[in-house]
């Protein structure tokens, strides 16, 4: 049986792009039409007794033009999600503004009560195009007194990836780390994350990469409610990971910057 879908009458993503001059031209024509119809109706109503019958159709024209004016203003000035350039800008806003703000609310009572963590978005050297790591992600350093941790978050329109590195001694520590963080990542699974654990040796450092990935039902970029949900959810997952790591003496402050292996 086909499911009924709620009709979408006005979707900015379906609006054909018009250059700025064309937008103002359309708006100006509608504004002039609405204003002239209203003025003519008033003149005929007050000054011309023989043309009072014209008032009703003129007012109808004015009302239609005014309604069209409002719709056109919304449609033509609503943000276009079809622009790749704008999506790149929104990716930067998501990673560097919204997510940083959410992560800055993290509290770790075992370290210090009533104080939130400091968050730094890692800036890349000039030779890295775009200033971020691994195509569509960014690195973050979090610290609160003697606690330090690093993480990587990537967003590809509606696909999210969150990567943490943990210091270990040997490959067999994978199962131990899985068990320590089972509740953190078990909770993440309820909103669609899948998490993989991978051991690696990066130069002289032994680490386990904990890579969680989720695909949102709707595009995240450009949707404020979706953005708020996901940045806060990432912050909650990170807070849970940090508190659990602190309780179990697991270091999340690796020399290697987290990212795809």
Image (cartoon, grey):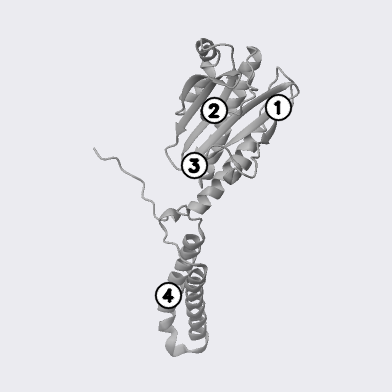
In the rendered structure, which disc, 2 or 3, sits on the residue that comes first in sequence?
Answer: 2
Number of marks present in the image shown: 4
In the rendered structure, which disc, 1 or 3, sits on the residue that comes first in sequence?
Answer: 1
Looking at the rendered structure, the secondary structure element under dot 1 is strand
Between marks 2 and 3 in the image, the one whose residue lies nearer the viewer: 2
Q: CA distance from mark 2 to mark 3?
A: 19 Å
Between marks 4 and 1 in the image, the one whose residue lies nearer the viewer: 1
Q: Please provide percent x and percent y for residue 49.
A: 46, 88
Q: Which mark is residue 220?
A: 3
Q: Which mark is residue 143?
A: 1
Q: Which residue is mark 2?
A: 163
Q: CA distance from mark 4 to mark 3?
A: 40 Å
Q: Please provide percent x and percent y for residue 94.
A: 57, 42
Q: Is residue 125 shown above or below 24? A: above
Question: Mark 3 and mark 4 in contact (Cβ < 8 Å)?
Answer: no
Q: CA distance from mark 4 to mark 1?
A: 63 Å
Q: Which residue is mark 4?
A: 61
Give the camera-side residue of 251 and 1: 251
Q: CA distance from mark 1 to mark 3?
A: 28 Å
Q: Residues within 10 Å of mark 1 (few under 14, many from 20)?
A: some
Looking at the rendered structure, the secondary structure element under dot 4 is helix
- Can residue 186 be seen? no
Residue at screen point 72% across, 19% down = 111
Q: CA distance from mark 4 to mark 2?
A: 59 Å
The picture quadrant where one finds residue 219 is top left
- Can residue 200 be seen? yes
Give the camera-side residue of 189 and 169: 169
């Amino acid at each position: 049986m086909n499911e009924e879908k709620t009709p979408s009458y006005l979707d900015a993503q379906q609006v054909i792009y018009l250059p700025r001059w064309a937008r103002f031209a359309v708006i100006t024509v509608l504004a002039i039409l609405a204003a002239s119809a209203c003025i003519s109706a008033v003149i005929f109503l007050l000054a011309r007794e023989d043309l009072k019958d014209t008032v009703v159709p003129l007012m109808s024209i004015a009302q239609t033009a005014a309604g069209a004016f409002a719709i056109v203003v919304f449609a033509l000035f609503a943000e276009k999600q079809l622009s790749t350039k704008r999506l790149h800008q929104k990716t930067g806003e998501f990673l560097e503004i919204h997510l940083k703000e959410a992560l800055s609310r993290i509290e770790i009572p075992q370290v210090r009560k009533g104080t939130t963590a400091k968050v730094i978005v890692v800036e890349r050297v000039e030779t890295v195009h775009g200033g971020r790591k691994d195509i569509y992600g960014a690195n973050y350093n979090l610290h609160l007194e003697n606690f330090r941790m690093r993480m990587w978050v990537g967003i590809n329109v509606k696909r999210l990836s969150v990567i943490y590195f943990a210091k270990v001694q040997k490959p067999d520590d994978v199962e131990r780390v899985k068990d320590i963080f089972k509740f953190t990542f078990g909770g993440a699974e309820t909103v669609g994350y899948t998490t993989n654990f991978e051991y690696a040796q990066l130069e002289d450092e032994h680490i386990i990469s904990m890579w969680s990935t989720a695909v949102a039902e709707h595009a995240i970029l450009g949707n404020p409610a979706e953005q708020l949900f996901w940045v806060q959810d990432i912050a909650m997952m990170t807070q849970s990971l940090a508190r659990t790591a602190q309780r179990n003496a697991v270091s999340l402050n690796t020399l290697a910057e987290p990212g795809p292996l």
